[in-house]
Image: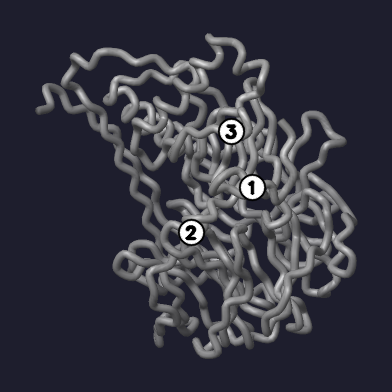
Amino acid sequence: MNLDPGTRLGRYEIQNHLGTGGMGEVYRALDTELHRAVALKFLRSEVAADEKRMQRFIQEARSASALNHPNILTVYEIGQADGARFFSTEFIDGLTLRTALAARQMKLIEVLDVAIQVASALAAAHAAGIIHRDIKPENIMLRRDGYMKVLDFGLAKTVDRTSSTIVTITREQSSKIWLASPSEEEARAKRLTSGKHDGQWGLDITPDGRVVYITQTGDNTDLWIMNADGTGQKQLTSNDEFENAVRVSADGRYIVFASTPAGSIPHIWRMDTDGGNLKQLTRGDFADYNPFCSLDNQWVVFSSWRSGKPRVWKVPIDGGEPVQLNDLPFEGGLLLPDGKQIFGQYFDEQVSPPRWRAALASFENGQIVKVFDFPLRAQNWKMSDERTLLYVEERDGVSNIWTRPMEGGAPQQLTNFASEQIFLYAPSSDGKQFAVARGTLAADIILIKDFR
């Protein structure tokens, strides 16, 4: 069935079409009673007429709804509208694992993280007597915060639970912030923080050398600022929301970041670097992320799903109506120092296989200027100027920051850490220092037999 945006089906209002599956259509909708985004999966009429496939549809909803696990898609209800059967689920802001794999090669630690999360979901399903039987990259979604979601229990099988053996999986990531100079040995790099989750959700440097970062404060993640030597640590936000993706304006006047209330979706906020003048810039039922300021501080540029697809938008820095910058599959990452080009990633359908690639887009009209590939093992791509690439590369389990000319040439290693992973990094405006969030990611699989 074809549903136009704005169509009302009971408590749900259709927003846009998300995709087509083997059994039906999937739409994003707004639950007007609870004011949350949901996904509605509709069964096509010819499928509904097939009793076997109809039972599979119901089986999928029942199997998933019987499970409560952070890595399994949450099913809210089974419904019927205008003669069509559907079920509603949580809306996942992210990509399928298949699309993510097509975009780039994953690091070993990322592969293990995916495996651990999916295994945790399947262990929970098995403990409930449900076997998925159709695990593949298309049925695994990767959220923007790193969580995996297992979908499509249409082929699931229910079995008797006679075993008292359970599997539990623990995952622990820790990080601290360091200040390092290019070509400096690890022994000379300076550790600035001693927390457990410092900088892994957001990190930047002001023009005068102060470090802005996000860390865990109790059960919340909040925004902090400190001097370049680690002194003068000051908390800038204090709430029950999840802060991430912090950026400082080129002149150091503003801080912009994404903030996600519990159980909701991220929106863009702005504040002065001293923590004052806090203002929410975007609202609504759409995920907004990756904000940064224009060079003249007139706009905050961000990526969003508010048009139904990932696109680049901008909003006046003092608030106002967001404006779509382009209608291309492009997500902005940062503004180059000249203020004229946005560096980000573009889904290139002209290559085989179609995949996400690094790209430059015009700030003036949003059109793609250049598309190119990064080194195969590169992570955390950035550009220090219109000619120079920065990235993180892992070798033998150790991450370091590298650089190379965009047009090709020999890569150069900029940091010399001998241990641990780099989760985030931020270069100073003169390129002479890096703030680096680095640490460890550990996971354990625990088998408990004869559990009572």
Residue type at mark 3: give it.
Lys
Mark 1 or 3: in front is: 1
Where disc 2 sits, the SS reads loop
Sequence-first disc among 3 and 2: 3
Q: Which mark is residue 41?
A: 3
**Circle 2 sits on which residue?**
264
Sequence-first disc among 1 and 3: 1
Name the residue rendered at 56%, 28% in the picture: 85
Residue type at mark 2: give it.
Ser
| Residue 424 falls left or right of residue 133 | right
Q: Is residue 436 visible?
A: no
Total marks placed = 3
**Circle 1 sits on which residue?**
8
- 62 lies above or below 36: above
Q: Is residue 259 visible?
A: yes
Name the residue rendered at 70%, 51% in the picture: 6
| Residue 223 falls left or right of residue 15 | left
Q: Which mark is residue 360?
A: none
Q: Nearer the viewer, residue 61 or 234?
A: 61
Name the residue rendered at 26%, 34% in the picture: 168
- Real-space CA distance between mark 3 and mark 2, rounded to the nearest whole angstrom: 21 Å
Residue type at mark 1: give it.
Arg
Q: Quadrant of residue 187?
A: bottom left
Mark 3 or 2: in front is: 3
The picture places residue 299, in percent across and down from the top left corner, at 74, 77
Name the residue rendered at 79%, 63% in the picture: 324
- Real-space CA distance between mark 1 and mark 3, rounded to the nearest whole angstrom: 15 Å
